[in-house]
Amino acid sequence: MKAEPMVMKKSRLSKPGFSGGSMVGPRLAKVLLHVVLLMGSCAMVAPFVWMLLTSVKPSNALDRFQWLPSSVHFENYSRALQAAPFGTYFRNSFFIAAGQTTLTLVFATAAGYALARLPMRGRRTLFGFTVVMIMVPAYALLVPQFVIIKMIPLFGDNNILGQGGTGWLNTWWALIVPGAMAPFYVFLARQFFLGLPDELADAARLDGLSEYGIFARIMTPLIKPAIATIAVLQIQVSWNNFLWPLMVTRSDSLRTIQLGLAIFSQSPNGVEKAYLMAGATLATVPMILLFIVAQRYFIESMATAGLKG
């Protein structure tokens, strides 16, 4: 009778769950995962670190590759601003990003609210078309957009049929309006509006509030994570856009920071790499600061965007 408990105890200890060696596999997998993630992080951060260090190196130290500068020259930043009109480029990028983001927030939230809340005919079809448009590459739309911008009637010496002139080419309209909307932002806003309780809108209607008032004063303030995410993504797209400003502008006074950096790097008189890296650093820092400020809303929005159908 006394041997039976010992046998039972031994059998329990022999189970895999009680074996110390069974924990080696998960721990090893966790360590390998962290190593892979660390290597990936270093690979992504390394170009930015090299750019930052190169921006403060002396000019004679750029003929050979080295990580650390022999001496630090912060004056490269002020000299870079004097070597090219980077101030104008920054101003243009700021105006374009602000204009596109403002229009995007208005249109995307309004369209998302309509697709989520208004009982209109064909709502599901419109939403399906919006989802399909998300899958269309943005570069596939560049040529049609360029033709439409060029044929805007009564602008740029065009007649009423959009012929004979340049339309919106080389204007602020061409830089701001075409990029002021994207179907993904409509999808994101709709998903958040679907997550709000119907009782809020019903109570506002009983109080006599119009549908515009419900949208602007009741519903929209409750989707701050979506608004922050749309703003961050749109600012990032506008700030880093290169190909579209290259296509629609000819004047140096309308060039953006990314286009200005590319033109500065192709100077026929040669270019100081330290100045170029200083300009690139100045162009990158605003986006990093923007994400740091809005990362809480951004992560929350990405985690909950697909919960509603």
Image: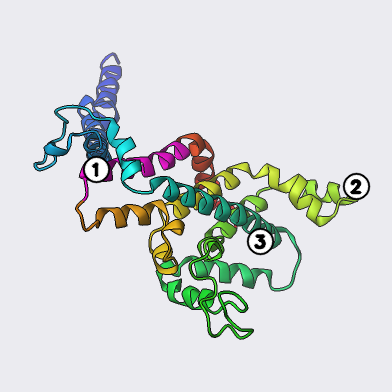
Q: Amino acid at mark 3?
A: Ala
The residue to which callout 1 is attached is: 47
Please tell me whether residue 164 is drawn above or below residue 214 in the rendered image.
below
Q: Are marks 3 and 2 in contact (CB under 8 Å)?
A: no
Residues at marks 3 and 1, CA–CA distance in whole angstroms:
39 Å
Q: Secondary structure at mark 3?
A: helix
Q: Is residue 277 magenta?
A: yes
Residues at marks 3 and 2, CA–CA distance in whole angstroms:
24 Å
Q: Earlier in the sequence, mark 3 or mark 1?
A: 1
Is disc 1 surrounded by few (<14), some (14 to 19) or many (20+) residues within 10 Å? Answer: few
The residue to which callout 2 is attached is: 207
Taking depth in this image into account, of 35 and 175 the one nearest to the observer is: 175
Residues at marks 1 and 2, CA–CA distance in whole angstroms:
57 Å
Q: Which residues are magenta?
A: 271-291
Q: Are marks 1 and 2 in contact (CB under 8 Å)?
A: no
Q: State which quadrant residue 122 falls in.
A: bottom right
At which x and y percent is residue 54? Answer: 21, 38
Q: Amino acid at mark 1?
A: Pro
Which corner quadrant holds the C terminus?
bottom right
The residue to which callout 3 is attached is: 111
Q: Amino acid at mark 2?
A: Asp
Extreme residue in the top direction: 2
Q: Is residue 137 visible?
A: no
Which corner quadrant holds the N terminus?
top left
Label number found at residue 224: none
Total label count? Answer: 3
